[in-house]
């Protein structure tokens, strides 16, 4: 276990929070340490957390949540994030509330929504971070893992040196490889706790869980490229210009009913393929472009007792790729069984 290196005054620390509250619970200590060192800080609050119906139903004593109700709730949560950042020493001028749809970042990623990609790239290019704190690739909340992939695509176009990447896990058991730890003293813990408490809408149902993050350590995983996660049920390799993806039944289970395989692949020239393969039917083995809806081509699906292997020919040299098993339309439960998996291309 390695202690996170101290920040210097020349550092530029960018935090990407998928929802209001992630900035405090995941990086409340980091932001204090960076500000104390005189480093420049910027925080991206990517959604307003407006699709958060159960706390809203509990607090407002209403069952039906309409569009206007969600907007009002999102505005309240945005205000809470700004208040939490102020407690952590971050001015509102150093925050960017982007307002993308809560529980919609996977759709933004897979459709190649121009404003989503452009806004993230613009923020990275404008701020030029030396350190980027972002959600873990295998975080089970789909907004978290999708934001990781989207930011990897954004920084791939940087003309300056790539920032150091530190991933935080919030939802589910996120195995920490190459653990990096920031130790917080009593004063830092108290400040982080006070920042978390600013999220009053979340305290009614999740107070104990949230305040558990205000302990003596913040843990991060250093991220190098988009390498594979060993514990994931998906693994892939490039073989003779073909991307071969193996779904391990021992980890995921044999039934793939209702599941789709999502693929985001970036060529060495920077072009991005966004595809979906529906795995339920053996008779319909094709990849669909999720940005345009057109057919990209046939895939080969080989099934055995141990694994399902999906093979897809590549049209150009692969620069980076990410894969995920998911339902095309999210169900009642928000969290994924598994997040995205990186494809090692070197």
Image: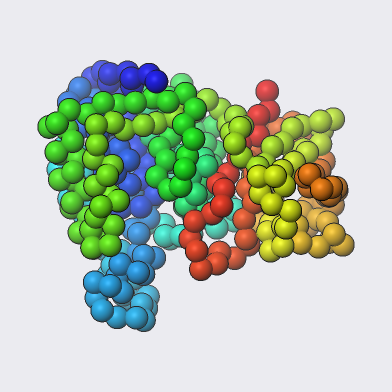
Which of the pair 345/96 is nearer the observer? 345
Residue at horizontal 25 percent and vertical 52 percent from the top: 208
Residue 117 at x, y percent in the picture: 50, 47
Residue 283 at x, y percent in the picture: 87, 62
- Look at the picture and state if 88 lies above or below 285: above
Residue 52 at x, y percent in the picture: 36, 65
Residue 178 in sight here: yes
In which quadrant is the C terminus drawn?
top right
Residue at horizontal 78 percent and vertical 45 percent from the top: 307
- Look at the picture and state if 156 lies above or below 264: above
Quick check: 7 left or right of 227?
left
- Look at the picture and state if 90 lies above or below 99: above
Which of the pair 95/144 is nearer the observer? 144
Query: Quarter of the image holding residue 242?
Result: top right
Quick check: 301 left or right of 27?
right
In which quadrant is the N terminus drawn?
top left
Query: Quarter of the image holding residue 255?
Result: bottom right
Residue 147 in sight here: no
Residue at horizontal 54 percent and vertical 32 percent from the top: 156
Residue 230 at x, y percent in the picture: 61, 32
């Amino acid at each position: 276990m390695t202690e996170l290196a101290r920040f210097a005054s020349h550092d530029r620390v960018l935090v990407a929070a998928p929802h209001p509250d992630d900035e405090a619970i995941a990086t409340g200590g980091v932001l204090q340490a960076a500000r104390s060192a005189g480093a420049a800080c910027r925080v991206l609050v990517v959604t307003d957390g407006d699709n958060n119906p159960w706390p809203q139903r509990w607090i407002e004593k209403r069952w039906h949540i309409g569009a206007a109700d969600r907007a009002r709730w999102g505005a309240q949560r945005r205000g809470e994030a700004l208040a939490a950042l102020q407690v952590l020493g971050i001015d509102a001028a150093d925050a960017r509330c982007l307002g993308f749809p809560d529980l919609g970042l996977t759709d933004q990623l897979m459709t190649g929504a121009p404003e989503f990609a452009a806004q993230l790239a613009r923020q990275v290019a404008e701020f030029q971070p030396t350190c980027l704190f972002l959600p873990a690739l295998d975080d089970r909340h789909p907004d978290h893992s999708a934001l990781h992939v989207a930011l990897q695509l954004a920084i791939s176009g940087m003309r300056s040196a790539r920032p150091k990447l530190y991933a935080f896990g919030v939802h589910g058991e996120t195995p920490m490889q190459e653990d990096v730890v920031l130790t917080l003293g009593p004063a830092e813990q108290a400040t982080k706790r006070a920042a978390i408490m600013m999220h009053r809408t979340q305290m009614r149902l999740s107070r104990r869980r949230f305040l558990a993050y205000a302990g003596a350590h913040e843990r991060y995983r250093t991220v190098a490229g988009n390498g594979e996660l060993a514990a994931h049920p998906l693994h892939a390799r490039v073989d003779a210009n073909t991307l071969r993806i193996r779904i391990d039944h021992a980890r995921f289970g044999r039934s793939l009913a209702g599941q789709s395989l999502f693929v985001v692949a970036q060529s060495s020239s920077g072009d991005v393929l966004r595809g979906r393969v529906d795995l339920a039917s053996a008779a319909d083995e094709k990849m669909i472009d999720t940005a345009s809806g057109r057919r990209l081509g046939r895939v080969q699906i080989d099934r055995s007792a141990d694994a399902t292997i999906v093979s897809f020919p590549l049209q150009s040299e692969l620069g980076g790729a990410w894969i995920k098993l998911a339902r095309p339309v999210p169900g009642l439960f928000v969290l994924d069984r598994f997040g995205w998996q990186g494809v090692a291309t070197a």
